[in-house]
Image: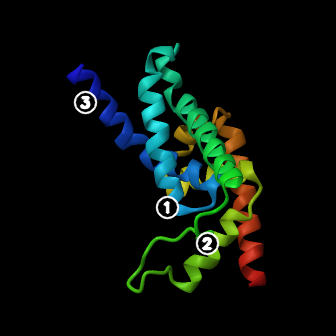
Amino acid sequence: MAGESRAFEGLVRRYERSVRAAALDVAKDSHLSRDIAQEAFLRAYRQLATLRRPAAFGPWLMQITRRCAVDVVRRRRTEGPLGPNLVATTPGHNGRLEEDKERLLAAVMGLPSGERQVVMLRYFGGHTVKDVARIAGRSVGTVTKQLSRAHRRLRNTLKEL
């Protein structure tokens, strides 16, 4: 049991940023995405015995994360918000992102969902294109094309601003 926990801890470290990025993609709230990530890892740990192909852990975990995020967002809608919907930010020196970073994050969040997911996994999660393809369950060529389209859209969006 202790060995299993340590092995899973390594997986948490490896996928933490990707899981948080996927949760942020659905929830649009950085604080809520952290809670969703914790819940997703707990669900994954509890359901680990149901994973048929260990090589498919990344896509399986992303699927759990998306389901968890949708559940949490749906629950919040029915329960009503407890406070203002916060913009996803990472605190800087003054507790807010610099203006340029805010614009970039807003532009990324405005991308179509497939492009947003690969951008977040690649740049926010720090994964290689090959890893992004494996995690997202897409071919390397598809991921490369989506990243190319996303770069073009981001360039155009940021030029307009």
Front one among 106 and 122: 106
Question: Dot 3 corresponds to which residue?
Answer: 6
Which quadrant of the rendered structure holds the C terminus? bottom right
Decide if residue 25 is on the left or right side of residue 155: left
Question: Dot 1 corresponds to which residue?
Answer: 31
Q: Which residue type carries mark 2?
A: Pro
Marking on residue 84: 2
Q: Nearer the viewer, mark 3 or mark 1?
A: 1
Q: Is residue 32 above or below residue 156?
A: above
Mark 1, other Cα within 10 Å: few <14 / some 14–19 / many ≥20: some
The percent coordinates of residue 8 (x first, y second) are: 34, 30
Task: Look at 24% across and 19% down and name the residue there.
Answer: 1
Task: Look at 62% across and 41% down and name the residue there.
Answer: 66
The percent coordinates of residue 116 (x first, y second) are: 68, 55
Label 1: state its secondary structure: helix
Estimate the spatial distance between the alpha carbons at disc 2 and disc 1, rounded to whole Å: 12 Å
Q: Nearer the viewer, mark 3 or mark 2?
A: 2
Task: Look at 68% across and 63% down and name the residue there.
Answer: 109
Marking on residue 119: none
Mark 3, other Cα within 10 Å: few <14 / some 14–19 / many ≥20: few
Label 3: state its secondary structure: helix
Q: Which residue type carries mark 1?
A: His
Q: Which residue type carries mark 3?
A: Arg
